Amino acid sequence: MPYPVLVARWQPNASERLVAAALELFEDRGYEHTTVVEIAERAGLTKSTFFRHFQDKREVLFGGDTMTGLLVGGIAAAPATATPFEAVAHALDAVGREAFTPARREFSARRRAVIATNPELQEREALKGLGLTASMTDALRRRDVPDLTSCVAAELGALALKIAYERWSDTTNGDDFSEVARQTLRDVHAASALC
Amino acid sequence: MPYPVLVARWQPNASERLVAAALELFEDRGYEHTTVVEIAERAGLTKSTFFRHFQDKREVLFGGDTMTGLLVGGIAAAPATATPFEAVAHALDAVGREAFTPARREFSARRRAVIATNPELQEREALKGLGLTASMTDALRRRDVPDLTSCVAAELGALALKIAYERWSDTTNGDDFSEVARQTLRDVHAASALC
DNA sequence: ACGCGTGATGGAACTTGGTCCCATCACTGT
DNA sequence: ACAGTGATGGGACCAAGTTCCATCACGCGT
């Protein structure tokens, strides 16, 4: 044998294995009837290791936390002449390019279905949403947008992001997230004029 | 003694005593360094009884759940000619009349300060906010407001409610919640035109 | 007066999420 | 060879939350 089977000390991608195991178990038995020990076992790990990778049981579905950076960066990078909404659109584009890639669509849909079945997970999602809104608000303020305007634009941006995420993850046609998000943001903008 | 001291089997207002005890302990030691057993003991009760009155430790600060009904009722009761925003204003008025009365201002301020120190409590508050937004959205839809418009109006209404709650609970002048809310809603509306 | 159902409470046992701390052991560089 | 490093295993422990049963004042009917 030219290449002796050198078994690595540990299987790689522990976090990803934990996420996959958790998602499968949540789909099968439901979130609340799945213990952390079971998730860890299915991933070939232990409870200790689970909590070394994730702060708590919920977080296993909210780990890839690159969103904040992308949104803040996208808003900051928008041209100086852009309106608040245009800056937000710029940010959503970045998210579509870097985070919600086509390869992640199916995972996103499954994740969303699981979250929809459990209040604890919805609670965590709501908190993440608050964080994103706050970050976008700050990013807009740094463009010298007035406080309340920043707040409202961020809120509507977060709403558009949420709706776009639903539309995108539920659809099977190959629409890019960026396209969906741009259209959603336009829809939201139009709707806000009718209030 | 004309009135023999007939000690009632149980002290009355168990829930309210638990809320008061919890708020005091959270202020003193912080939410996470307070156990449910301690809250119950301070209220002269036990852990069992605590969980009979509240679903979980967080809920002790989110109990008086009359808001949803008030908002939905207020929106439904608005004149048929009212715009979505005017219907929401009508709802916020009802909240000021029935829930956020002057007598509750100080409690609200203390409660808000405690929530601000703890992510778990913020998570719960975020979830409650989602619920309120969803209820308002539905109430607007029932007025035949288009889906997305309902959604946006509810979102901005919830934002105004949140900001108004902060303004109102932080101020010492005797401003009525309804007044603060009306002004806040106008501010939000104006800001949304600048996005 | 007596007995009985009711309802809010007490209390104990148990599961699970989450923390802490220490042991293990392949890999790496000196 | 040898010591340090880093991801892991594992056990003790605490607090949240559930379940189930016991208690006991009150009111009501007989």
Image: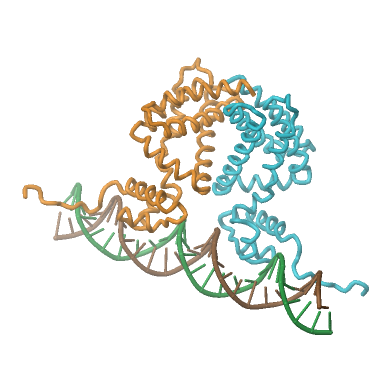
Chain colours: A orange, B cyan, C green, D brown
The correct choice, above or below, for B168 with respect to A7 in the image is: above
Image position of B147 (left or right of A52): right
Q: In the current view of this chain or complex, which residue is farthest to the left?
A: A1
Question: Whole-percent x and y of residue B143?
Answer: 67, 30
Q: For the C terminus of chain A, which image quadrant?
A: top right
Q: Can the viewer see residue A154?
A: yes
From the viewer's side, name the closer residue of A176 and A83: A176
Question: Whole-percent x and y of residue A109?
Answer: 41, 38
The image shows a total of numbered marks equal to 0
Query: Which residue sits at x=72%, y=38%?
Result: B73
From the viewer's side, name the closer residue of D27 and B40: D27
The correct choice, above or below, for A146 with respect to B15 in the image is: above
Query: Which residue sits at x=50%, y=20%?
Result: A86
The correct choice, above or below, for A91 with respect to B67 in the image is: above
Image position of B50 (left or right of A63): right
Residue B37 lies in what quarter of the image?
Answer: bottom right
From the viewer's side, name the closer residue of B80 and B3: B80
Q: Can the viewer see residue A56?
A: no
Query: Which residue sits at x=67%, y=27%?
Result: B84
Query: Which residue sits at x=39%, y=26%?
Result: A175
Question: Whole-percent x and y of residue A91?
Answer: 45, 26
Residue B141 lies in what quarter of the image?
Answer: top right
Q: In the current view of this chain or complex, which residue is farthest to the top?
A: A81
The correct choice, above or below, for B35 with respect to B163 in the image is: below
Question: Whole-percent x and y of residue D29?
Answer: 81, 73
